[in-house]
Image: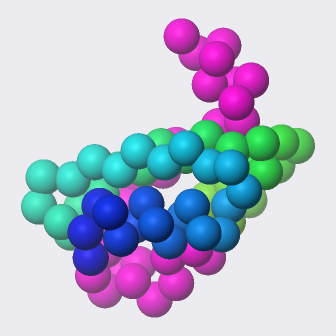
Amino acid sequence: MTKDDISYLIKTRINNAVVNVYSDDNTHFEVIVISDDFSGESRIVRHQLIYACLGNAVGNEIHALSIKAYTYNEWENLE
C-alpha cells in the first residue's frame, strides 16, 4: 500500500476531502484529512470513518496509522 493508494481510498469515500499522507517506510502512516463530513462528529467517529475507507488494509499492509481529522473551519483556525 502506498501513500497514493491511501489518499485515493479516503478521497473516494469522504466528500471534498483534502488528504495528506506521510510515511517513511510504506507500513507506518500518518494522515491528515480535512473535510466538512467531519462536522459535528467526535474524534472517534472521524477515525472510524477513515478506517472504513481503508478496510482490511489496516493491520495488514498498513501496520500503523496516525490520524488527524479536521473540518475546513477547524483547519483554518489551526494556522
Front-lying residue, 67 or 1: 1
Say which quarter of the image contains residue 36.
top right
Q: Judge whether 56 appears above or below 20 on screen.
A: below
Name the spot of residue 18 as percent of width and height, x first: 55, 44
Name the spot of residue 44 as percent of width and height, x first: 69, 56
Say which quarter of the image contains residue 6.
bottom left
Residue positioned 60% across, 69% down in the render: 12
| Quadrant of the image containing the N terminus | bottom left
Judged left or right of residue 72, residue 41 is: right
Q: Was residue 74 drawn as part of the magenta stretch in this picture?
A: yes
Residue positioned 70% across, 25% down in the render: 74
Check the image and name the residue furthest to the right. Answer: 40
The answer to whether one can see residue 11 in this image is: yes
Residue positioned 78% across, 51% down in the render: 37
Q: Judge whether 61 appears above or below 10 on screen.
A: below
Q: Was residue 53 drawn as part of the magenta stretch in this picture?
A: yes
Name the spot of residue 75 as percent of width and height, x first: 62, 25
Say which quarter of the image contains residue 58.
bottom left
Judged left or right of residue 75, residue 41 is: right
The answer to whether one can see residue 43 in this image is: no
Magenta-tinted stretch: 52-79
Judged left or right of residue 49, residue 67 is: left
| Quadrant of the image containing the C terminus | top right
Judged left or right of residue 61, residue 51 is: right
